[in-house]
Amino acid sequence: MPVTETRTPNEAAVDVTGLAKVYGERRAVDGLELVLQRGSVVGLVGPNGAGKTTALRMLLGLIQRDGGSGTVLGSNLDDHIGYLPKVGALIEGPAFTPSLSARKNLLVLTRLVGLPDSRADDVLAQVELSDRAKDKVKTYSLGMRQRLGIAASLLTDPELLVLDEPTNGLDPAGIREVRDLLRQLADEGVSVLVSSHLLAEIEAICDHVVLINQGQVGYSGTVKGMIGGQVAQVVARPADPDRLTDLAAVAARFGETTTNDDGTVSFEGEQDVAAQLNQAAFDAGVLLSGLGILRPTLEQAFFALTEKSPAQAASPQEEGES
């Protein structure tokens, strides 16, 4: 009977604690904890300079860490030979030989690690570059180079995929393709760790999110849990702009109300409160031309949390989370 490699579903793909990197007197990463479950997509977000790329580079052994321990794909964090062959990565931007075609660039890599040439064709198809496979990389746009970089990271059929700003330079269609690809890979059991400044994309594709602020974890949990710290808003617009003050007076019965520059009033509430406002405004003779619920987004949560210190931001935890 042939021996086949098995993956342990209950074992975290990444489980590290105390990860640290110091440059002079600056702690670029300060005690980072990160857990990535098998087959999940975790988003790494944070302000510029927060330590996201530094953390990824330490996980991949590209730079030496100054602290921390843990495991990656079941191997000790120090055992790079044990886990790196099972990791695909794209960090800070792909580097290819401009004078070679996309396919030839990938063939250099497949032959280096002993993979069949057909694997290059497989990954080019995955990132929708088959029709440009024979074109020289120097003719590629930034977005196409990014897609080629993702293709290269998939060559070894990795168990863990680490991507730093993978949608950089992509148009909306390309961003959607990458989003769909990452979700497909996760459904197939690949664990994905992705950093991005496009918070709407993180919200769309990630199961969990880790917010790094000043080198520390400001939040770690589900996307829903991070957004849950923000409250939905009822937003109403009077049909007659001159009745905005009257509408604000009616809305004030339901809570603290804000009169906005765009001619609307808003306050915290859900659909049932919006219905009550509609009736109250009608009874007061104020007709509405617009009424809706503004749902909180990951972007709003991001700015709310990054305005706090990391310790303040991390203190509220989701129910059942440790």
Image (spheres, rainbow, N blue to C red):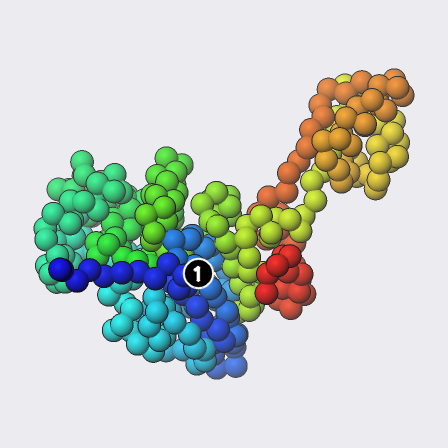
Amino acid type, mark 1:
Leu
Q: Is residue 51 above or below residue 262?
A: below
Find residue 130 and report its image quarter.
top left
In the image shown, does 278 or 53 lie closer to the viewer? 278
In the image shown, does 18 or 145 lie closer to the viewer? 18
Q: In the rendered view, does 40 fall on the left or right side of 280?
A: left
Residue identifier under label 1: 36
Q: Is residue 208 above or below residue 134?
A: below
Q: Is residue 23 above or below residue 142?
A: below
- One can see residue 237 in this view: yes
Label 1 SS: strand
Image quadrant where one finds the C terminus: bottom right
Q: In the rendered view, does 260 fall on the left or right side of 221?
A: right
Q: Position of residue 64 (x, y in %)?
A: 37, 78
In the image shown, does 28 or 269 lie closer to the viewer? 269
Q: Position of residue 230 (x, y in %)?
A: 67, 48
Q: Is residue 48 above or below residue 64?
A: above
